[in-house]
Amino acid sequence: MTVQPMSAAQLTRKVIDKEPLFILDVRNEREFADWKVEGENFQILNKPYFELLDGVDSVAHQLPQEEDILVVCAKEGSAKYVAERLCDAGFKRLSYLQGGMKAWSEHLEPVKIGELSGGGSIYQFVRLGKGCLSYVIEADGEAAIVDANRMVDAYTQFAKDNGLSIRHIIDTHVHADHISGGRRLAKQTGALYWLPPKDAEEVTFDYRPLVDGTSIALGGGKVEIKAVHTPGHTIGSTSLIVDGKYLLTGDLLFVASIGRPDLAGKAKEWVDDLRHTLYETYRQLPGHLVVLPAHFSDMRELNPNGSVQEKLGELYRHNKGLRIESDDEFRVTVTENLPPRPNAYQEIRQVNMGKLHPNADEQSEMEIGPNHCAVHE
């Protein structure tokens, strides 16, 4: 019997569809503790590969005989070896994660969010393995891409499959948790690349300034993307109101939490900006706007279709980060006792400013692990 691989796309569907799955993760304990595959109906066991080199007897009694088992490692090889040994030991419902956690980190799943009143649609590209969310907004054959990840082929293939011409690439801020694919995508497609100038004082490349009030039209003006300066996560952080229906908040506001102001080393300087954006700027916007953030931290934030979204008015009722009455308490919340910073966040910022030029393998290694962009996790 040959053990079959499971692709990151297939695993994504199991997460979204809430299917049961038993995962045997054979990475070392430190890597497992930092970051793992998660799903609402998943069970998971960590048993380091080196403990299974002489046989799988030590773990076999902990595994279910009548359930699907997925063996996971960093890049595939170790998981395939262990899965084959388990097959030899009599387990039948086995697979291994094709491409390992590297592939899981890099898979982008497009999910349709909804229609636009001027025609066209908005899609959320969900990166479950990293918690990143990016967007394709399309109208009348034209597309804008917001907060693109470095796996740009996912966007160009989507555009090709749907007959779209990519005209605009927008980064809501200079990211610190993942390497932006914005400039590369703009170069490949000839699209305009937009970036908030207050974040761009040190960048080494040309861009279009995304400032408060900037209006970007799609589909011959059928759909408007309007920029709103919303500092706090970074000094230039900018939100986007799309078609008067959707609010793309970047890393300022999430479904279950709020953004952190410390990833550029300016927590004390930016905390007041963050509070003003969350408690005044956003509060003045219509509550029916659907918030579409750039990240999420927990699979429980996923809706049944796999998307991450919620109306702004609902967030003011349920998001704890929007219900802190005291200025002092807010300051402590967003500057102290925060989650660990993202892996290699300083280097990632340097890459996104055009100052570092790592190769593909180095970029992948820099991004490994969760995003840690939220205050509460």
Image (cartoon, rainbow, N blue to C red):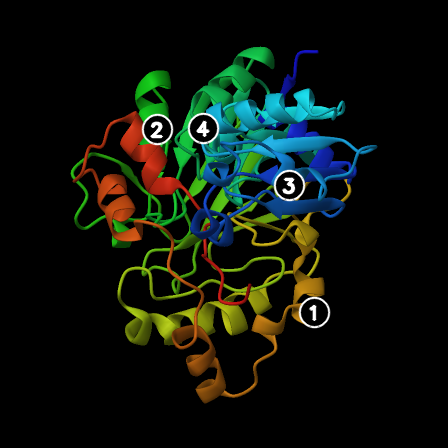
Per the image, label 3 sits on a secondary structure element best described as: helix
Q: Which mark is residue 78?
A: none
Q: Disc 3 versus disc 1: distance between alpha carbons?
A: 42 Å
Per the image, label 4 sits on a secondary structure element best described as: loop
**Residue 305 visible in the current orientation:** no
Give the mark, 1 or 2, whose residue is nearer the N terminus. 2
Q: Label 3, on which residue?
A: 59
Labelled pair 1, 2 in contact (Cβ < 8 Å): no
Q: Label 4, on which residue?
A: 75
Task: Decide: is 76 above or below 188.
Answer: below
Per the image, label 2 sits on a secondary structure element best described as: strand
Amino acid, disc 3: Val
Q: Residue, x 63% and y 46% (percent of image)?
A: 45
Amino acid, disc 4: Lys
Amino acid, disc 2: Leu
Per the image, label 1 sits on a secondary structure element best described as: helix
Give the mark, 4 or 3, whose residue is nearer the N terminus. 3
Residue 270 is situated, as x and y percent measured from the top left of the image, at 33, 70
Q: Label 2, on which residue?
A: 192
Q: Disc 4 versus disc 1: distance between alpha carbons?
A: 39 Å
Query: Which quarter of the rendering shows the N terminus?
Result: top right
Task: Decide: is 259 above or below 325.
Answer: above
Amino acid, disc 1: His
Q: Disc 4 versus disc 2: distance between alpha carbons?
A: 35 Å
Q: What is the tally of numbered marks visible in this picture?
A: 4
